[in-house]
């Protein structure tokens, strides 16, 4: 099974592996092993006892996913979305759509293409495969009927399919996990897993990959969410929308670093993030580093640009108080998890109090 998309690949891969493990041993990538090196390493871990092989497929150009499909021919292909991640390397969103669609083109007629009905570029990929299509999303056959946040910021998800419905709490922060859960359900249904089983498994799915909406609470009572593994305009927007709903008014701080590999669109895309944060009422928007500075300037009075991680840490330590919620997010190259680590100490505890 192959999974691709501009955002959400690793989280969805982890959730799907957890669901499928109910039926037997599953091989899935460690972290984001999703390129011409990581995919073979993942495939080589499979043996005669493996009941499912889940392969995350990334791309930085047209033809990359086709190559990965030749290494690991998929029987189910999941396309989550087409966004602007790596747009600087692709040269445009339409080229990204061409590349992501290579996954469904590689499916056999007996396979299944699992497509996001809410993304028009993904939905159009139905014409690029001879395999049956199963859609997911608010407009999908596996319908995301609702997603609400619990008091600790985790999504309560309602899914519907073929006259059946399930509701469950996925124990990982983030509204975006509603769409991820719908994608997982569609992929699992394509493999014959019952919807009730999907819900039961997702309700026990702890985070597997680090620095992805990892929620901890400091000894001072500050909630710190480390989402510093990666960032693009779509995932930034999703994280900020979560923060705006998860924090009490006036208690939300976004610590944001650069979104890399955006090419000539970088300045404008960073400004868009700042404007979104302002519109959502985020009380403080701290941009770390020169490339991220347009976020702060576009966030209005809430914006604060700092030159580096050390200044960010010092500023936050001097101003945060119990009950504040801090989101830390940037592209991996920024290593902004250092901010999250500094705000926490040995007395930290996770969302479930452990």
Image (cartoon, helix red, strand yellow):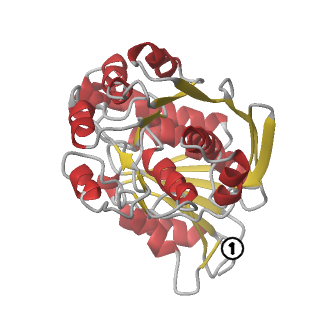
Residue 127 at x, y percent in the picture: 44, 12
Q: Is residue 153 left or right of residue 50?
A: right
Residue indicated by mark 1:
352
Q: How many labels does the image show?
A: 1
Left or right: where 30 falls relative to 170: left
Closer to the camera in the image, 223 or 208: 208
Q: In which quadrant will I find the N terminus?
A: top left
Above or below, 139 relative to 195: above
Label 1 environment density (alpha carbons within 10 Å; few <14, some 14–19, many ≥20): few
Residue 258 locus on image (x, y percent): 36, 45
Give the residue drawn at x 53%, y 55%.
Answer: 20
Query: In this orientation, which residue lies closer to the viewer: 196 or 254?
Result: 196
Vertical comparison of 50 with 141: above or below:
below
Identify which residue is drawn at 62% across, 59% down: 172
Compared to residue 50, the image places residue 159 above or below, namely above
Q: Quadrant of residue 261?
A: top left
Residue occupying image coordinates x 73% and y 62%:
152
Image coordinates of residue 250 in percent, x first then y, are: 72, 53
> Judging from the image, what secondary structure is the residue with disc 1 in?
loop
Q: Residue furthest bottom?
A: 346
Along the line of sight, the residue nearer the viewer: 204 or 222: 204
Q: Which residue is drawn at 40% across and 50% down?
A: 54
- Determine if residue 347 is in view: yes
Quarter of the picture containing the C terminus is bottom right
Which residue is nearer to you in this view: 31 or 327?
Answer: 31
Q: From where the camera sits, is residue 249 visible? A: no
In this picture, residue 293 sits left or right of residue 118 = left
Q: In this view, does 45 lie above or below 296?
A: below
Residue 211: give x, y in percent of width and height: 45, 62
């Amino acid at each position: 099974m192959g999974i691709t998309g501009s955002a959400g690949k690793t989280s969805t891969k982890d959730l799907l592996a957890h669901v499928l493990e109910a039926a037997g041993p599953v091989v899935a990538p460690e972290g984001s092993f999703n390129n011409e090196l990581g995919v073979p390493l993942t495939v080589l871990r499979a043996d005669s006892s493996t009941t499912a092989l889940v392969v995350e497929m990334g791309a930085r150009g047209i033809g990359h996913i086709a190559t990965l499909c030749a290494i690991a021919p998929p029987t189910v292909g999941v396309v989550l979305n087409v966004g602007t991640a790596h747009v600087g390397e692709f040269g445009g969103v339409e080229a990204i759509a061409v590349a992501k669609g290579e996954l469904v083109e590689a499916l056999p007629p007996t396979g299944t293409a699992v497509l996001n009905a809410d993304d028009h570029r993904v939905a159009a990929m139905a014409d690029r495969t001879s395999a049956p299509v199963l859609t997911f999303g608010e407009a999908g056959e596996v319908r995301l009927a609702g997603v609400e946040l619990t008091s600790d910021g985790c999504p309560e998800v309602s899914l519907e399919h073929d006259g059946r419905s399930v509701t469950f709490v996925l124990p990982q922060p983030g509204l975006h996990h509603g769409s991820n859960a719908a994608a997982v359900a569609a992929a699992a249904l394509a493999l014959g897993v019952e919807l009730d089983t999907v819900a039961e498994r997702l309700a026990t799915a702890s985070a597997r990959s680090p620095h992805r909406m990892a929620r901890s609470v400091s000894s001072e009572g500050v909630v710190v969410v480390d989402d510093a593994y990666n960032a693009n305009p779509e995932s930034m927007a999703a994280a900020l929308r979560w923060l705006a709903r998860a924090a009490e008014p006036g208690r939300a701080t976004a610590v944001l670093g650069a979104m890399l590999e955006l090419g000539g669109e970088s300045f404008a895309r960073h400004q868009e993030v700042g404007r979104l944060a302002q519109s959502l009422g985020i009380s403080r928007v701290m941009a770390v580093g020169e490339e991220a500075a347009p976020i702060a300037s576009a966030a209005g009075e809430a914006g604060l640009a700092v030159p580096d991680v050390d200044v960010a840490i010092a500023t936050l330590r001097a101003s945060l108080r119990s009950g504040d919620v801090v989101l830390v997010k940037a592209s991996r190259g920024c290593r902004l998890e250092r901010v999250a680590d500094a705000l926490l100490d040995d007395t930290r505890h996770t969302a479930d109090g452990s």
